[in-house]
Image: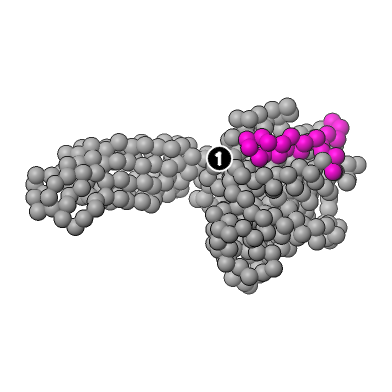
Amino acid sequence: MITLEALRPIHPRLIEWRRDFHRHPELGMEEYRTAKVIAEHLREWGYEVREGIAATGVIGLLRNGDGPIVMVRADMDALPIQEANEHDYVSTIPGKMHACGHDAHMAIGLGVAEWMAEHRDAWHGTLMMLFQPGEEGFNGAAKMIAAGALEHPHPDLFLALHVWNEMEVGQVSAAVGPVMAAADAWSTHIIGKGGHAATPHESIDPVYIAALTVEALQSIVSRNVDPMKTAVLTVGSIHAGTAFNIIPNEAELKGTVRTFEETVRETVMGRLKTIVEGTAWMMGGVATLEVAEGTPAVVNDEKVSHVVWKAITDIVGEQGLRTDVRTMGSEDASFFMREVPGCYFFVGSSPVDGEKVPHHHPRFDIDEEALIIGAAVMIDALLRLFGGEAA
Ligand SMILES: [Zn+2]
Ligand SMILES: [Zn+2]
């Protein structure tokens, strides 16, 4: 199909775009400058452009004859982090930084969009380039769907990628099935009965109930979830009391549940409710569970993933193909993938033999070779999908 070397001439442009986005980070649902830059390029290359979808979302449509409608998604938001890097393209906005790599995703998206527009004789169908706001906790994907992003036209197939610093540049992974977890946030208020710390017998101590609850919650993954399945339950926040000599009236716990499968999720959420309410009841208090349903799991379609495997092999060879990367992190691309079968793949982006600075870290950076690899795999996969390989 294509080779990395054939695409090499566009690498300087990918770097230039990525560094421009990196210098000008914008937080979720506020990506106004970013969206404007993207929309202008798409128009210049002949795309029909829709802007302002769920605040700042952009869709570019390139109709190029009969064939499947394939959607490529990139996310646009930065994070509220003060950058600690010292390269010459550091963030110019205090307290904001592209520390997840979404600057790279947009640069790759633009590179793909331009190449596909300039090589219309190489494929037939409709390409839908979607740039979404607010991936970092705002569910921008769901907001774009609610605003009609998947209608007129409704795409047949979906592709997205994430640069991935846990993997060295030159490796690309597309696993079949779940690759990122469903994430639910939960909280509980445990109501006891406050009093003097010296007279516990006249109180119902919510601190003790909270401690018992945290302890009992550990039994869910170890005793209720099938050992062959995956789940995480973390208590991330615990608050109660104001002074050493007072038994407070209430305590608050907050946490998250991460699962790959709906049946496992139901088991964990059911036990969570029973333990939270039951532990408080057992000790004479009252607790209720509140759940904020988060993002669903990212689940890769088998046929589309197999096409992406061929694309990865074309670009980085057999030795660069991985099919095993999964993470309990979450991603709102899952909202699109619930509606459209597709593949979400990881592009290794940490320097070979170098330090693997994690995502969301103030010194996060990527090896920019990942830009050309990501764009090349995406283009190769698109050419294969437009050629009917996933049908
Ligand atoms: Zn992130
Ligand atoms: Zn990200």
Residue at point 46%, 46% (across, down):
258
Residue position for label 1: 139
Q: Is residue 172 above or below residue 189?
A: below
The kind of residue tagged 1 is Asn
Q: Secondary structure at mark 1?
A: loop
Taking the image as shown, residue 310 lies to the left or right of residue 85, namely right
Residue 202 is drawn in which quadrant?
Answer: top left
Q: Which segment is the magenta one?
A: 44-66
| Label 1 crowd (10 A; few <14 / some 14-19 / many >=20) | many
Q: Residue at x 67, y 69 (%)?
A: 87
- State the residue at coordinates (82%, 47%): 114
In the rendered picture of this protein, how many numbered marks are placed on residues? 1
Q: Which colouring convention does the figure follow?
A: one colour
From the viewer's perspective, is residue 82 above or below residue 39?
below
Instruction: Residue 62: say if magenta.
Output: yes
Asked if residue 387 lies in the magenta stretch, the reply is no
Q: Is residue 148 left or right of residue 68?
A: left
Task: Residue at 68%, 59% (x, y): give it.
Answer: 23
The overriding secondary structure of the stretch rendered in magenta is strand
The spot of residue 390 in percent (x, y) is 73, 38
